[in-house]
């Protein structure tokens, strides 16, 4: 084979492929042309290597093919549209669909925590079973308040965000086995209840509420959502319903749980920022609690009001026959 003639005859196609590969945007016709030229150039390279493998020609054509391949495989530009769709439709719709699970868990666990605080406060000897007198004095006088300002705010925010996101994810993931969710919740409720009871006994109940409310309203709600969604996953294989197998029901609930877990990550970031910057701030207690209550109310409105609208749109699309991803 005359290599020079072969290269001369096809060099125009290779150059054209390289020119298209360098462009930032291609029309549909140009994209199709690039694919065809790339496929033909790979054949040309194979022929050259098998018959007259000139290293210079092989290297130059390989470079052009790499550029063409990179252009073909190049993804589209980053778009915020999927992120906005998730935040305005998918996530709130899933929160609304699962609302009875996490609202029920919120009511039950809040009542249980309040009962534990009352019991510990009414029976001071109970705290003595777990804490020494020195530990109780240090908790009331230093540790409880000092915990929120022990580290720099940005580091503390990252720490509590990571810990809370991990705990919430564990509740969702462990829900398939049901029992571990109650253990995770039990440890958290015990800690809050014991601390609250000790603070109330010492006459520092107002301090406890001042430092737990700004971030705790949103933070604990996220935890209760994780617990409710996790138990919903576990219930899916216990009682899948008459129209679905256990596998179908479990897959559907797990997919929903994954969406909620992703959405709770930025929500818990907000809770972490509140805990790091608002809870220990010098603002008056009423202002700090009001900020936390406002953010918490905004999240509930997002989940229940915007979620209801998003779920209604999803149902309307399903009835219209659109093939939407299963939530």
Image (tube, rainbow, N blue to C red):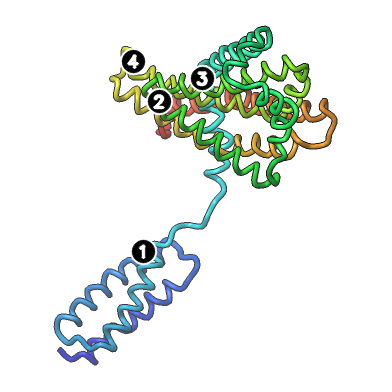
Which residue position is annotated with label 4? 238
State which tag comes first along the sequence, 4 or 1.
Answer: 1
Q: Residues under labels 3 and 1: Cα distance?
A: 60 Å
In this view of the protein, which residue sits in the foreground, 243 or 14?
Answer: 243
> Residue 68: x and y, percent?
37, 71
Q: Residues under labels 4 and 2: Cα distance?
A: 12 Å
Q: Residues under labels 4 and 1: Cα distance?
A: 51 Å
Which residue position is annotated with label 2? 253
Note whether 261 is above or below 48 in the view shown. Answer: above
Q: In the image, which is nearer the foreground, mark 2 or mark 1?
A: 2
Asked if one can make out residue 312 in the rendered structure from this viewpoint, the answer is: no
Q: In the image, which is nearer the foreground, mark 4 or mark 3?
A: 3
State which tag comes first along the sequence, 4 or 2.
Answer: 4
Provide the secondary structure element on which disc 3 rests: helix
State which tag comes first along the sequence, 4 or 3.
Answer: 3
Which residue position is annotated with label 3? 186
> Residue 249: x and y, percent?
34, 22
């Amino acid at each position: 084979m005359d290599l020079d003639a072969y290269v001369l005859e096809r060099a125009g196609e290779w150059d054209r492929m390289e020119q298209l590969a360098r462009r930032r945007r291609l029309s549909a016709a140009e994209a199709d042309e690039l694919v065809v030229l790339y496929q033909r150039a790979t054949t040309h390279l194979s022929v050259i290597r098998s018959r007259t493998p000139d290293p210079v020609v092989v290297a130059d054509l390989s470079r052009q093919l790499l550029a063409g391949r990179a252009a073909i495989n190049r993804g589209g530009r980053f778009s915020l549209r999927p992120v906005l769709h998730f935040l305005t439709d998918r996530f709130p719709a899933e929160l609304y669909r699962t609302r009875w699970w996490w609202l029920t868990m919120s009511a039950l666990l809040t009542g249980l925590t309040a009962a534990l605080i009352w019991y510990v406060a009414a029976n001071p000897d109970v705290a003595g079973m777990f804490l020494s007198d020195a530990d109780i004095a240090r908790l009331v006088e230093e540790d409880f308040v000092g915990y929120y300002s022990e580290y720099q705010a940005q580091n503390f925010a990252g720490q509590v965000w990571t810990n809370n996101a991990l705990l919430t994810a564990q509740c969702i993931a462990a829900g398939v086995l049901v029992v571990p969710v109650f253990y995770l919740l039990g440890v958290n409720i015990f800690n809050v209840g014991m601390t609250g009871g000790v603070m109330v006994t010492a006459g520092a109940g107002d301090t406890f509420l001042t430092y737990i409310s700004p971030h705790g309203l949103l933070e604990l709600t996220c935890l209760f959502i994780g617990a409710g969604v996790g138990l919903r996953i576990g219930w899916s294989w216990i009682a899948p319903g008459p129209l679905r197998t256990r596998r179908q029901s479990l897959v559907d609930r797990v997919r929903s749980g994954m969406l909620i877990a992703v959405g709770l990550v930025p929500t818990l970031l907000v809770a972490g920022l509140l805990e790091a910057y608002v809870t220990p701030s010098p603002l008056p207690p009423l202002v700090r609690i009001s900020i936390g209550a406002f953010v918490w109310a905004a999240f509930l409105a997002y989940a229940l009001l915007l979620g209801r609208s998003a779920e209604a749109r999803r149902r309307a699309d399903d009835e219209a026959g659109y093939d939407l991803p299963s939530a």
